[in-house]
Image (cartoon, grey):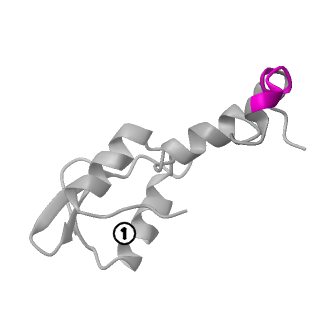
Amino acid sequence: MQDCIAAAHFAKRPLFRESLPQHLCCIYNKSVLFSSVNSAQARRFLARHGCTFETGKGGHLLVRRGDRTSTLPQHGGRKQLGKGLWSKILKDLALKENR
């Protein structure tokens, strides 16, 4: 079972245990749709959703989807895009991440 700080918290509240998810991380994951991804994963996701790519300045790609544009940094395979940046890219391109 996944280690979670919420197991003891919900064990103390038996009235709410049936109505709420078991762990705080489950509550957090339901409220946050955007997870962090690296630039290669982001590019594959965007390509599957009909985006095209053009070279940009200084290691960035210009991403186009219809008349919408955004910029995708290409800073190495292990470097994760922040959740805020990823959500901004999706918002700019009118996409939603369904996981």
Horizontal and vertical percent for residue 40? Answer: 47, 61
Q: Which of 54 and 32 is in front in this view?
A: 32
Q: What stretch is highlighted in magenta?
A: 9-15
SS at circle 1:
helix
Asked whether 86 falls inside the magenta stretch, the response is: no
Horizontal and vertical percent for residue 41? Answer: 50, 62
Q: Nearer the viewer, residue 10 or 92?
A: 10
Q: Please name the amino acid that badge 1 sits on.
A: Leu
Residue plotted at (37% across, 75% down): 47
Q: Mark 1 points at which residue?
A: 46
Regarding residue 60, the answer to whether it shows in the image is no
Q: Is the magenta stretch mostly helix, strand or loop?
A: helix
Residue plotted at (14% across, 75% down): 66
Q: Is residue 16 above or below residue 32?
A: above
From the image, which quarter does the C terminus lie in? bottom right
Asked whether 11 falls inside the magenta stretch, the response is: yes
Q: Report the side of 15 relative to 39 (left or right).
A: right
Regarding residue 50, the answer to whether it shows in the image is yes
